[in-house]
Structure formats: C-alpha cells, structure tokens
Amino acid sequence: MILKRKKTSDHVVLPVFYDVDPSHVRNQTGSLAKLFARHQKTQSCDTIKEWREALAEAANLAGMVLQNEADRHESKFITKIVKVIEDKLRRTTSSVHPQLVGIDSRAENINLWLQDRSNDVGILVIHGMRGIGKTTIAKFVYDSNFRRFPRSSFVENIREISEQSNGLIQIQKQLLHDISNRRKVEIHSIREGMTRMQDAISCKKVLLVLDDVDHKDQLLDVVFGMREQFYPGSKIIITTSYAGLLNAYQQVKFYRVETWNGVESLKLFSLHAFGQEYPLECYMEHSRRLVQHCEGLPLALKILGSFAVRKLEAIPDGQIWKKLKLSYDSLQDNHDQDLFLHIARFFIGMGQDVIVSILDDCDFFTDVGMQNLIDRYLVRIDKYKTIQMHHMIRDMGREIVLLESKEPGQRSRLWHHKDSFEVLKENKGTQKIEGLCLMNMKMHPEYAPSRNSDDQLVFETNALVLRLNGSYKEFPTGLRWLCWLQFPSDFLPNNFPLESLVALEMCYSSLRRVWKGTEYLPSLKILNLSHSHGLKVTPDFWPVPNLERLILKDCASLVDVHESIGNLGRLVCLNMEDCKNLKKVPKNISMLTSLETLIISGCSKVEVFPTEISQMESLKVFEADDVPIHQLRTASQWWTLWPRKSVGISWASYLPHNLVTLSLRKCNLSNDNFPRDFGNLPSLQKLDLSRNSVCSLPDCVRGVRGLLELSFEGCKRLKSLLRLPNVGELEVHNCESLEIITFQSLSASRICATMNSNFNLVEVEYWYKLQPLELVDVEMINLLGLSNLNLNETIMMKISSPFSYGRSMTHSLQGLYEYGIFSTFLPGHYEVPQYGSFSHKSRGPSISFTVPSLPTLRIRGLNFFYVYEKSNSINFAEITADNNVPHPVIMKVSNKSKVLKWIYGPTFFCVPGYGLDVIWLSHWKFGNKLEGGDEVTFSVFTKFWLQIKEWDLKLVYYEEEDEMTRQHNTTEPFYPCVIAGDLSCNLVSGAHVLFPLMNMSIGDMLTSAWFNRVTGDVDEITGMLFSVLYDFAPTFM
C-alpha cells in the first residue's frame, strides 16, 4: 500500500531498517527467508511475488539503518529520523524547471557567499535584464541552501504583488508565515507587520529572498531599516531588473547575470524543442538561426524552443515582449520612453556622442535618460562607445510603435523605408510623426552592429535611393537630423532648409562644394561628408561656429581644408581618414582648443606636419596609420621630423603630452625611428605599432607606465619583446619571427595576450620555455633517465601548438618547461632505461594509490611515462561534447587528502604519424603538496583521434646529497622562472587549470560537458584558480 501511494502521488518514502540489513530485505535472506518459507504455505504465488518485489524496491530506496550507527544508540537514531523527516516537511522547495542549463556556474559564487559562515548580515543583489534568469538562479541557490538556515523565505513577484491593494501587507504576511512557521498570520497595517518582522528575524538566522523588486518602497526600505535587527549570519538576496535601485545603500554585493553563451543557448533551446541536448539534424540550421536571434536570452530560448518545429511565423513573440515590456513600463518619465523608442528605431549601432548631440537639441536630457535605460537593461554601451540593444528588446519597441495605429501615417516613428516612402508619396503624413527613415540604416557609415547580432533576421536588404526634384520649400523646416546617402547634386541649393539641423550627413554624395552663400547655421553640430569622392575642398566654416564633429573619411579628392577650421572652438572630433590626396595638415589646427580626436590615417601623401600640435592640451586620440610620420616636414622647415639621432628631436616630441591613444600602424617604423623615451607622453594608455618593421621592443615603450593596450600585430620582423612593462592587453598575433617574450617583473606578466601564427615563439617568461633537449640541464636529463640517449640525433618531429593556428612546426628533440612541469616527446622506438622501475603501469584511464610514507626520504616529484598513437579507426558518430577535450592530452592529478587538483594540457604537443608511437615523458615538481599517506588519483583524457597504449608513473625522491643542496639553494637550475617554478606556490583549495584557454571563456569552460567530465563532481571545482587567464597566459583569438 505504501509503495502504491508513492507511485500514484508525490509521497516520499523513508525506509527504516531496524536491526536488519538492507541486503537481507532486498534478497529476502536471513530471517526473512524463514518467514517467506512459512507464508508460502498459506499465501498465493502472486501475493508472495508482490511482497518480494515490494521489499526489493523498499530496500533500494535511500533509508535509515540502525546498525550503521557506531554505538547503536536507539534514542540518537530516533532523533536523526525525526531531523530527516523535519527537513523534508519543513519546507517545500521553490519550483525550478528541471531543464536547467548554465545555472551551476552562475550560482557557484553565490553558493560560496551563502556558505561563508560570516556573522555579518549579508545582502546580495542579483541584477540583469528581464528574462535573463535571475529568478531561476535565486530559486536554485535558495533550494540548495535553505536547510542551512533555521528560518527562510522566498517571496516571489514582489513588483506584481505590491501593485495590488494592500500588496505590501500581503508580502509581510507571507514572509512572517515562512519564518515563524505559523499556518495563519494576521496583520492589519504595515507598521504592525514591521514590528512582528523585527521579532521574527532577530531570534534565528534567516535566509530571505526578495524576488523582482522594482522600487525602493517595495519592502526594500523596510528590510534595510531593520538590517541591524537581523540575527548574525543572516543572508538577504534581492533580484531586480533595475541596476540603480540599490546604489544608495552601503555594504551591498552585486551579481550581474550575463546572457548565455552559444553552447548553453543551443543546449537550452534543444531541450525545450526536442527533449535532448542537441537539435535534430534536419533542424540544425533552423535552430542555430533562432538561437542566434535570441542572443543568449533564456526566456526567448525557452519559448522559441517550445515552438521550434512549427513555422517561424507561428512563434509567439508576444509572450516574450510582454515580459520585456515591464522594464519599458517602469520608466517614470515619458521622455525616457520616447528616448527608448527613438533609439530602438533609428540609433542602434551608432556612437553615443552622436546620439547625445542630436537628441539633446530635441529637448531630451539624453545623458540622464540614457543612464535610466541602461539601469533598466533596455540599452547597453559596448566597448566601442556605441549603443546596442538586444534583438528582443528592439522588437518589443517596434511592437509598441506598431500598436499605435494600423496606418503608418498615424504612428510616431516610421523605420521601414517602404512605409516612409508611401507616406511621403501619398501625402499621408500627420503631426504625430516624430521620425522617419528613407534608407536601410545598415548602410549608414557610422553603423556598428552588435557583435552578436544576426543581421539577416533584423534588416531589409534592399536600400532605397531617394531623389527629390524641384523646390525644397515643402521640405520640413524643423528637421534636426538629415541623413541623405548618395545626394545627387554638386552642392546644397540655397533654398534647402538647414537652419534647424543638428546633424547633416551626406555620405557617398556627388558634392563638389558643400554650400554657396549658406545662411548662419548655429545649431549644426555634426557634419559628415564621408565617401564624397568629388569633394576637393572643404567649405568655409564660418556658418557653423558650433560644429563638434567633422567627418571627411574617404574624401579621396580632397586636397585642402579651409583655414577657417581654426575658428571651430567647439570641434571635438576631426576625421580625415583615407583622404589620399591631402598633402598637409592645416597649421591652424592647433587653434582647436576642444579637439579630442584627430585621425589622419591613410593620408599617405601628407608631407607637412604642424609642430604646433604639441600645444593642443585637449587632444587625447591621435591616429596616423599608414602615414610616414618620421619623414614628415614641419611647416617652417624642410628637414624631416627625424633628421639625426644626435639632434635629439623626433616626431614624438611634437605630440601633445595629454595623449591617451596613439595609433601608428603601417608607418614603416624601424627601431631607429623611435625616440629614446616617451617621457613627454605620461598619459599614454593605448599604443598600436602593428605592421611596422621593428625587430625588438623599442626602448621608449619599455619606460611607459600605465599602458592598457599594446599591439605589435603583423610585425613580421619582430624577434623579441624583452623586459615588457606592465600592460593590460598585448597583441602579437601574426608575428612570425617572434621567439621570446620577457617581462620586467612577475606582476608585469599578468596580462591578456592575443596570439596566433607565432610559429617561432619558444619562450614566454613565467609561462613556458621550449629548448633543444641537448641544452636541457643535465640534472633533469638524469632524473628522467635519458643520460644514455643520443640527444644530438637529428630526428625531426612535428610539434603542434596553439600559436601555429592549425599548422604543425618541425623541431628536433625538445624539452618543455611550464608550470613547474618538464616534458619531452620522443619517438616510440626509443628505449627509456628507467621504464622498468615504474611501478603503476596502466592501460586504463586512471591510476589510484596511497603515497608510501618513507621517513628518511623526501618526495621530489613524479615522473610520468605515456605511449600514445593515432587511433586506427575513428567513429565520428561517437564524438560528443563530453569526450572532445580542447587539448590532445589532458592529465588530471587529484590529491584527495589535501583537496587539491591539477589539470594540465601541454602547450606544445608531438603529433604522431600514422602507425607510429610517441613517448611523452614528464617530471612534475609538487613541493610539499605531495607527502606520504596522501591518497592520489591520476587520470588521462585524450582527443578522439588519439589513443593511449600504456602509461605509468614513478615517485622521485631527493637523494641525501640533493637534499643538502636543496637546503642551500631553493631555486633548482633546471627550472626556468615559470609560475614561480613550483606548484606549491599560489595554490588555493581547488584546482589549477594549467593550459591556455585559447578562444574559450571561463564561463564556456565551466559549463562544457568535457570539463564536467574531467573535474568530476561540480562541487570539487569550488575555489578554482584559473592561472592561465589571470596570472600570465594569453587568450588566443
């Protein structure tokens, strides 16, 4: 009867095995065998069979066994039973969908915070855009941790409940019901609720989750006002879609939920669409397009996944928009709502400063409004300072406008050029229209699409080229922003209404002159004439005294900039990129007291450079790519800016001292063309010297402090970067001759580097060193038993590395030092003399043993021996995300006694030929992290195309004379300075991931199937130290 109820309802069964072994119950042996023998005489065969099956099923359930108690103390056993049942009945866990993807990695740090045993009353805010999974994460961590707290409460939908009559009182009732364990709670006022809450939260430790809080008056002021009354160690979690909600409060931790990555998104979508982790083959392309369109938003992935096998038109976007529109509705100001709709329809992908210039003149408080939109996760600003918006939010904004009217002429904004053209052609326009688009905005030169966007799902592909003939008297006079691509005339006619314009963009125009006798235009701030190939001279700038941005990009025929440019006191940006016939930079450019950005990249015929530019204190960005800057003449001199080394004058001395960004790509600069130092550039943060002829790190760069970005991309002659200063990001890909990188200090090596096609890079200080085996220290050779081998033998082997970008490099026998590990790869026919003394041979994936305790000897490290080959047959159908590890071979060492773990993939790896074996020998230095009595497990994982034939390991001890030497010399000669040379340094409880992440993010790795397989239980990776990303190693692109 009990087990029948379990099958037909949600009842939980807890078997109690009182003085009986569960195996006896399962198999009906012992005393049960005698009972069944007696009952078989009186009961039917069906009844006996039913009893046996029920007992076997009960025995397989997790239960309580008295004889497992050490002292068989019955009262303690009963107390334990009561505690288990109380835990099961005391709380019903919050409802979390079983198809969870990506939650473990996002909840990990929150779980650590909840379990930190601090006596402080902690408050954590989980924030992010709507539909991103904040509530799901909060439910997950609540369900995982509420039993650690005597009292707990999860209050959902606070925003929705608070809008109801007496909503705050209803929330207080639920909270009091949960934390006081009372069936019914009656309160009649908010004040009464506060008083009773103070009593409840001060008695015992509380875990409190307040979900979807949108305003301070939705219980926040109450909770923060009582923070001091909470019992020590209590934790409060708040989820919100309003990032600025808690800025005024002190001692609050914040956790921002980011969108799901591509792997997680496809998996989540597939689980809801197909009930499995990957799409059906026939739906793969369709699924990928939909997943890309969702841009990692879990809400959209779930809803669209549920409709994936239907027609695209049937997908219920309305369910998604309804959720997202809550953030739009929560905007307190109509100006903010209008700003959002303007951006959603016209400004996505454009520069923030351009948008501010245009909309500020339309009576928007754009900076304030923009921050409000950012706080509500309706827009975001990317690293290029352009405005981006999630596809689903953009579509929600479009739907809001579409619902204004069925007739295009009655809507506030027309973004589809066909609608706009129809309204103009049929004269259906009304006063309601605030903006209209007559072109495909994707064609706009300043358009910068989201790096994650799928444009083919977003934009129409047929652009409309508009040509208006006759008088312009009927053209709208209140126009603030006019963007007219391919303007057909040679100049703007006199009757063209420009007086109210803030931004005039005439890209790809036929203009030869901009205007003739134009009236005063005090409102114009942006003039963009890019790609106007017929323009030879700029206009006189007297009509536009308030101009802030002048963009002349790719005006290929431009030969002269009008001298009146010096009167533009508010000009912030001057872009003359690719003006290939421009021969001089105007001298009076130095009069531009507000200029922050000057771009002359691609102006390859420029010969004269004004030295007065050094006086421009406002200039922050100077880009002069593909300009022979070291050969330019000054306006008053005919010698070059780099006449002789002895003169001590260089082009660098003419740069303004407040410069932050300097780009000199493809300027044909060699080491001799650089000054002794950049002492006059103390504020420099970004320096781009890509595609120049430098052979080594220029001395002037070595002395720069505070560099955030340094690029040598494509410097084909670059051989060394010695004594690099502190740099945030280093870019050296396609430096084919680069051999060595060293740093001024260990701290300087903690960089993020972009590398590939670095075929000759054999040493990166504090990371790895690759050298011919005959040059390796003799002591290391002896440790591995290689002293009798002919190390000078010219046997060539193919070595692959992440820098070779899919191309193998050929080397003689090499030794590799990295992370305190020494490795070498040998042909399979080599005989390693020590191999007979290895004691843990295996052909399987793992070896486990207890380290023997030898009081007279101290462990030096471990020697590993692997023999591997290419797999004879590869079944591609069996290749899954679970077994496709990112490196050819990954070795995991787990010291269970010390709760330590190392996961290592060698940076360089020998690729075996077909039918040939390769031997991988390595020595691991463990220091005091491996001692007698430790329980250790060693596991090996390979890519699908490799097969381990056999492997073994051997403990290596210090000999007596070695120990004496070690005490006097702690730095062993055969270890170069890599990650302090010792795995006992810089460790935390958890695991070292000792391989480059390449194009993987930490999030991608944590959520990957292979990583979960390698690490085992997710709980084991708590406290992991990602040495490769944070300490010294590169991110590969």
Image (cartoon, rainbow, N blue to C red):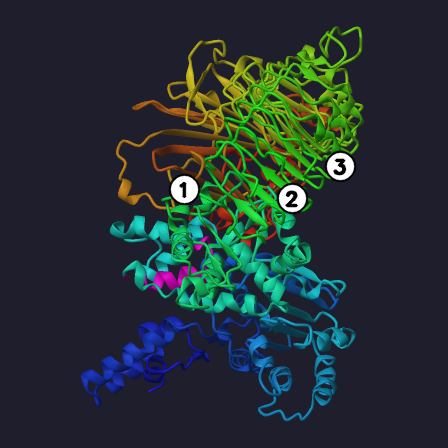
- Provide residue 609's location: percent of width, then percent of height: 70, 18
| Distance between mark 3 and mark 2 Cα atoms | 14 Å
How far apart, in angstroms, are the residues tagged by discs 2 and 1? 24 Å
Q: Is residue 323 part of the magenta span, yes or no?
A: no
Compared with 284, 273 (above or below) is below
Is 475 on the left-hand or right-hand side of 971?
A: left
Mark 3: amino acid: Gly
What residue sits right under mark 2 in the picture?
Answer: 524
The disc label shown at residue 281, or none: none
Tell me whether circle 2 and circle 1 mark residues in contact (CB < 8 Å).
no
**Which stretch did the figure color magenta?**
294-310
- In the rendered image, residue 274, in percent from the top left (x then y), is placed at 31, 60
Nearest the eye: 483 or 878: 483
Q: Which residue bears the numbered disc 3?
A: 569
> Residue 465, labelled with which disc?
1
Residue 298 is inside the magenta segment = yes
